[in-house]
């Protein structure tokens, strides 16, 4: 699978520009995934392509970031390091195929994020005080399902799944701190896999997040030999 493109399509920037085989993405500066260069091909002129990327982000008052995954051109990572770009957020890609399991808790699933779902996810994963609206534009930029385990109408654990052909991309897995270690995220994950009904699924998780990796492994997800990271300057 072309995981670079799958992630790009599941988490779409609302502004993008193509330049010599690269996709320059911007979404208000919120999340590196939607605010970074996706270098899918080797440009004819590498120096010019990097300069174009740097100009694109400078025009928007943002740092220049590159997402370097399985499809990145050989040598690009080393060239960016030579230019002073910092390596950020090494990330695993994990894949699943197999039988779905029954959730242990009731799970609400909708085709759009409701306000309380967004509140729960933002409480865990929100990194920009003024970025909520930008993230909502990203989330709703692709057809998806939104799941939550609720108590008294309040989502305690949430997740998002994007059907992409014969695979399902799982995103936005988050549990409120006071509700952890109760198996709620496990139920959300199982419910999304069952709703998708697809033969395979994938998700991405930072290498530093050992607890999430353990959960995903226990549900049949295995890390692929390839992942991605960012170079930021």
Image: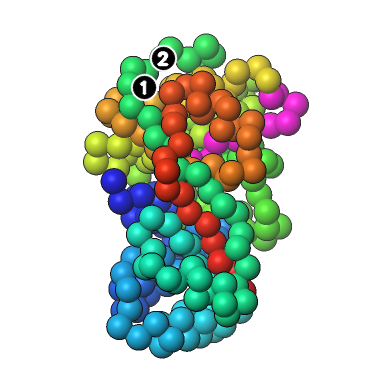
Say whether marks 2 and 1 touch (CB < 8 Å).
Answer: yes
- Coordinates of residue 86 in the picture (x, y in percent): 63, 68
Whether residue 17 is visible, yes or no, is yes
Residue visible at 68% across and 58% down in the picture: 128
Q: Is residue 174 magenta?
A: yes
Marks 2 and 1 sit apart, C-alpha to C-alpha, by 7 Å
The chosen color scheme is rainbow
In the rendered structure, which segment of residues is drawn in magenta? 170-180
The residue beneath circle 2 is: 101
Which residue is rendered at x = 24% and y = 36% of the image?
A: 166
Report the residue at 60% width, 63% height from top.
87
Q: Is 71 positioned to the left or the right of 207 in the image?
A: left
Q: Position of residue 119 (x, y in %)?
A: 64, 41
Foreground mark, 2 or 1? 2
Q: Which residue corresponds to the image point at 53% horizontal and 78% vertical from the top-left? A: 57
Q: Which residue is mark 1?
A: 194
Q: Nearer the viewer, residue 161 or 47?
A: 47
């Amino acid at each position: 699978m072309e995981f670079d493109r799958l992630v790009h399509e599941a988490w779409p920037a609302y502004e993008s520009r193509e330049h010599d085989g690269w996709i320059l993405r911007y979404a208000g500066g919120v999340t590196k995934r939607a605010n970074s260069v996706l270098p899918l091909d080797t440009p004819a002129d590498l120096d010019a392509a990097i300069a174009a990327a740097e100009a694109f982000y400078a025009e928007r008052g943002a740092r220049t970031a590159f997402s370097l995954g399985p499809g990145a051109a050989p040598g690009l990572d080393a060239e960016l390091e030579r230019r002073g770009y910092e390596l950020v957020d090494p990330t695993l890609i994990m894949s699943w195929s197999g039988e779905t399991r029954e959730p242990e808790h009731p799970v609400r699933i909708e085709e759009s994020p409701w306000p309380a779902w967004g509140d729960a996810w933002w409480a865990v994963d929100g990194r920009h005080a003024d970025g909520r609206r930008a993230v909502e534009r990203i989330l709703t930029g692709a057809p998806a399902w939104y799941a939550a385990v609720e108590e008294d109408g309040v989502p305690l654990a949430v997740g998002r799944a994007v059907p992409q052909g014969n695979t399902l991309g799982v995103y936005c897995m988050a549990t409120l701190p006071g509700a952890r270690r109760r198996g709620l995220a496990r139920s959300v994950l199982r419910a999304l896999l069952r709703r998708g009904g697809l033969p395979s699924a994938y998700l991405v998780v930072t290498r530093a997040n050992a607890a999430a990796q353990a959960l995903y492994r226990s549900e049949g997800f295995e890390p692929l030999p390839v992942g991605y990271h960012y170079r930021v300057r």
